[in-house]
Amino acid sequence: MKKAIKRFETLEKAYVIPKPTWGSLFYYDARLQHKDVIVLCEVIEHINEERLPKIMSLLLSQYSPQTLIVTTPNAEYNAVYELDEMRHDDHRFEWTRSQFQKWCHVMNSHEQYELLFTGIGNEHNLYGQPTQMCVFTKKEVSV
């Protein structure tokens, strides 16, 4: 995060600079309610799977951002790297694209968000891209 802050400081003043917020995903933080965007970039794989539903409930139900972006490694792509194990010692899991998509749909059980799945990085014909991403976009409420 310190590197990102330094990069933002070098931008021209014409740009809107994001304001980093320090906190924890395990405790409620009123500052995060109703934000435009919340990003979990390469975060979830560092958390034990059984703790993720509570975190996602907090994010989607209580914070209720307009957009939530979640990225995580694509386990299938590890074959391209010729890895027999996870990419980092601190990863608790790495999911295939199918596992990630299923998990995102389960986390969106109230269906208040549209889900868009995509990848990031060079695409392999068989294994997809190294990083997978889900963009949760809040559905418009009809009156």
Image: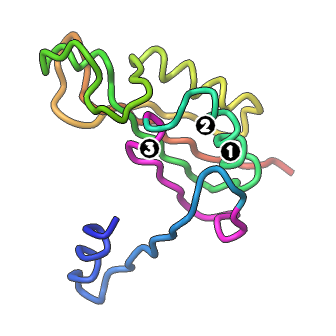
In depth, the one of 52 and 57 nearer the eye is 52
C-alpha separation, residue under disc 3 versus residue under disc 2: 21 Å
Instruction: State the residue lying farthest toward the bottom.
Output: 13
Q: Name the amino acid, label 1.
A: Lys
Q: Name the amino acid, label 3.
A: Val
C-alpha separation, residue under disc 1 versus residue under disc 2: 6 Å
Where disc 1 sits, the SS reads loop
Disc 1, disc 2: CB below 8 Å? yes
In depth, the one of 21 and 85 nearer the eye is 85
Residue 140 picture location, percent across and down: 71, 49
Q: Which residues are magenta?
A: 29-45
Q: Residue at 39%, 16% (x, y): give it.
A: 96
Residue named by callout 3: 43
Q: Is residue 116 left or right of residue 1?
A: right
- Name above or below for residue 35 compared with residue 128: below
Residue named by callout 2: 114
Based on the displayed image, in which of its 4 quarters is residue 49 positioned? top right
Residue 87 picture location, percent across and down: 25, 28
Q: Residue at 39%, 79% (x, y): give it.
A: 16
In depth, the one of 32 and 2 nearer the eye is 2
Residue named by callout 1: 139
- Name above or below for residue 11 compared with residue 39: below
